[in-house]
Amino acid sequence: MLRSALSAIFNNLPAHKVKAHCDGPCGVYDPASARVAAEAVLSMTKKLLSMEPPQGNDPAAWTVYNNTFSRYVAIKEDQAKETKKELLILWTDYFKPEHLASYPDLHDTFWKAAKLCSACKVNIDQAKAEELMQSVEKIHHMFWKSKGRADAWVTAS
C-alpha cells in the first residue's frame, strides 16, 4: 500500500530535464591519463623484449624469470586496456559532431588508436607500442586545440 502511494507521488512529480556530456557531468577531460597508460605499455614492452631467459635448468632462476615476465605482461595488458578506456571516454563523451569540421579524421584516429591498444595487449611488439604513443600524441594535440590551447606533449619517460 505504502509502495503504491509513494510510486503515485513520485510518478507525478515534475522532472527537470538534465543534460550531461558523460555519465557524470563533471566536465573534466584530459588525455594525460591515456598518455600515462600508453607509456606504461611501451615501457613494459621494452622490458619484455630485453629480458634474457636463464641458461640451463636452474628452477629458481626460471621461477624468477617466469614471475617477472608474467608480471610485465599483466601490467602491459592492463595498461593497454586502461589506455583504450581513457581514449574511448574522450572519443564518446568529449568530442562532439561539431569537432568533425576541424578534425575530419577524428573517428578514424580514435578507431585506429583503440585497435592499437588491442594489438599491444595481444602482442609484444615495440613498433605497435610506439605507434600507440604516436596516436595518443595526435589525440592530445586534437584535444587541446579543440579547447583553444596548445599544451605541450610531455612524456614521463
Image: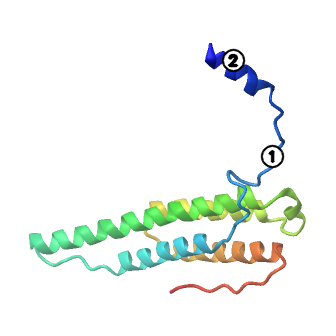
Q: Where in the figure is residue 70, as x and y percent of width and height?
A: 30, 65
Asked which secondary structure carries label 1, the reply is loop
Which label sits on residue 18? 1
Q: How many numbered discs sit on the rendered protein?
A: 2
Q: Using the image as rendered, state which of residue 138 and residue 17 is in the foreground.
A: 17
Q: Using the image as rendered, state which of residue 43 and residue 148 is in the foreground.
A: 148
Which label sits on residue 5? 2
Q: Is residue 118 left or right of residue 14?
A: left
Q: Where in the figure is residue 55, as x and y percent of width and height?
A: 15, 78
Which residue occupies 66% across, 84% down? 153
Which residue occupies 53% across, 62% down? 82
Quadrant (top left, top right, bottom left, bottom right) of the N terminus:
top right
Amino acid residing under circle 1: Val
Q: Is residue 3 left or right of residue 45?
A: right
Amino acid residing under circle 2: Ala
Whether residue 87 appears in this view of the structure is yes
Q: Is residue 99 above or below residue 143?
A: above
Q: Where in the figure is residue 142, as x and y percent of width and height?
A: 77, 73
Which residue occupies 88% across, 69% down? 102
Q: Using the image as rendered, state which of residue 68 and residue 14 is in the foreground.
A: 14
Q: Is residue 129 left or right of residue 152?
A: left
- Residue 53 sits in quarter: bottom left
Task: Using a 10 Å C-alpha cutoff, classify the residue at mark 2 as few (fewer than 14 neighbours), some (14 to 19) or many (20 or more).
Answer: few
Instruction: Give yes or no for contact between labels 2 and 1 (Cβ–Cβ under 8 Å).
Output: no
Whether residue 115 appears in this view of the structure is no
Which residue occupies 51% across, 60% down? 81
Tell which circle, 2 or 1, labels the residue nearer the N-terminal end. Answer: 2
Residue mark closest to the camera, 2 vs 1: 2
Asked which secondary structure carries label 2, the reply is helix
The Cα atoms of the two marked residues, 2 and 1, are separated by 26 Å
